[in-house]
């Protein structure tokens, strides 16, 4: 089929996500209970009831979003199976953290193992954050930003300051990571070039940059304990914007922490190979908006809650019986 399944990353979390699904579906409750057991605390209560500032913490937001994507996709797949329908996507992909839910959907990562893995990922990333951060640059193209970053003063570089491209999310929406001094320099330099919107993000560190090298190194040893399986569906890696080699899963996931997210290129890769519809599984509909900007000619649907799932399923054949 000409469909791809996609899963959002950190920043899409919100208190109350999956609440309607949790109330309506025994299967959803089973999966959230399994996540609670895997972690040894009630992630489900945090997802359903908050508080928001605790859910937003990197070590909590990451497993919460993995669980949300995995649950929504599982309910969709099992509902189709109950109708006797097989839907095989051309690709699965995720934005940053979302790649773990994509690996789960591709059969490469067991659910409970994924829950524990992304929790540890979040802990390591939070611990390595230091004093740096991230900022969205809106309304500027990648070429301008790259030209400005190429002018970063050697004196600041020698002093340990950094600012790097972290996310290419869509045309006109890019994200930088860096030290505080690096981000201040970038903001001033970009505003001199006419950029008006430079928005600091509420994250705990300079993710997807070389400043996360310590976290990436520690995470490699964690990944070495995980038994990944060969994906049953091609997974598009957002580090390379190409199909992920099964033998390289662990290394790519370690690199992802300190390398840019090439989401624009990833979407274009899938469209160039025939994808004409994207279905997003996860709260917020963030990826749907990005994909419409990258490839306005394709269809995009979101399943972020019970209504979204029901809307998708209503398009399919009715239940038998």
Image (tube, grey):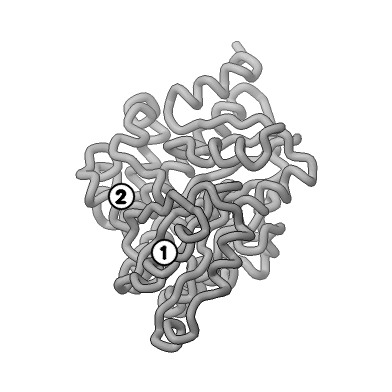
**Residue 244 versus residue 31: which sits nearer the camera?**
244
Q: Name which residue lies at 69% across and 36% down.
A: 3
**Residue 60 versus residue 81: which sits nearer the camera?**
60
Number of residues whose C-alpha sits closer than 10 Å to that of mark 2, classed few (under 14), some (14–19) or many (20 or more): some
Q: Is residue 89 visible?
A: yes
The location of residue 68, given as percent across then percent down, is: 42, 42
Q: Nearer the viewer, mark 2 or mark 1?
A: 1
Secondary structure at numbered mark 2: helix
- Which residue is situated farthest in the left direction here? 51
Mark 2–mark 1 Cα distance, whole angstroms, equals 45 Å
Q: Is residue 246 above or below residue 28?
A: below
The location of residue 120, given as percent across then percent down, is: 37, 65
Residue 54 relative to residue 94: left or right: left
Residue 127 figure quarter: bottom left
**Residue 105 versus residue 121: which sits nearer the camera?**
121
- Which residue is situated farthest in the right direction here? 273
Tell me the tag on residue 36. 2
Exactly how many numbered labels are in the figure?
A: 2
Q: Name which residue lies at 58% across and 72% down.
A: 251
Secondary structure at numbered mark 1: helix
Q: Name which residue lies at 57% across and 22% down.
A: 313
First-in-chain label (2 vs 1):
2
Tell me the tag on residue 188. 1
Q: Is residue 112 above or below residue 297?
A: below
The location of residue 22, given as percent across then percent down, is: 34, 31
Q: Is residue 121 above or below residue 86?
A: below
Q: Is residue 102 above or below residue 1?
A: below
């Amino acid at each position: 089929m000409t469909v791809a399944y996609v899963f959002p990353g950190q920043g899409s979390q919100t208190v109350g996500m999956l609440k309607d699904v949790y109330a309506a579906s025994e299967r959803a409750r089973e999966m959230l209970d399994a996540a609670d057991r895997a972690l040894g605390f009630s992630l489900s209560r945090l997802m359903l009831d908050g508080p928001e500032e605790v859910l937003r913490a990197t070590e909590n937001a990451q497993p919460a979003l993995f669980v949300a994507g995995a649950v929504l996709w599982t309910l969709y797949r099992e509902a189709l199976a109950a109708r006797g329908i097989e839907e095989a996507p051309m690709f699965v992909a995720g934005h940053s953290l979302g790649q773990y839910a994509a690996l789960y959907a591709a059969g490469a990562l067991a659910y409970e193992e994924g829950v524990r893995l992304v929790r540890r990922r979040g802990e390591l990333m939070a611990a390595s954050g230091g004093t740096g951060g991230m900022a969205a640059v809106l309304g500027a193209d990648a070429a301008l930003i790259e030209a400005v970053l190429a002018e970063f003063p050697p004196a600041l570089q020698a002093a340990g300051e950094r600012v790097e491209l972290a996310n290419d999310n869509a045309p006109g929406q890019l994200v930088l990571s860096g030290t505080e001094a690096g981000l201040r320099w970038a903001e001033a330099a970009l505003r001199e070039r006419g950029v008006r919107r430079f928005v600091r993000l509420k994250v705990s560190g300079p993710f997807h940059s070389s400043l996360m090298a310590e976290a990436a190194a520690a995470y490699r040893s964690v990944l070495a304990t995980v038994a990944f399986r060969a994906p049953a569906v091609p997974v598009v890696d957002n580090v390379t914007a190409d199909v992920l080699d099964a033998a390289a899963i662990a290394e790519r996931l370690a690199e992802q922490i300190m390398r840019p997210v090439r989401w624009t290129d990833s979407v274009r890769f899938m469209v160039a190979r025939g994808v004409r519809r994207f279905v997003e599984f996860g709260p917020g509909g963030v990826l749907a908006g990005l994909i419409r900007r990258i490839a306005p000619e394709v269809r995009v649907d979101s399943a972020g809650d019970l209504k979204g799932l029901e809307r998708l399923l209503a398009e399919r054949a009715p239940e038998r019986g």
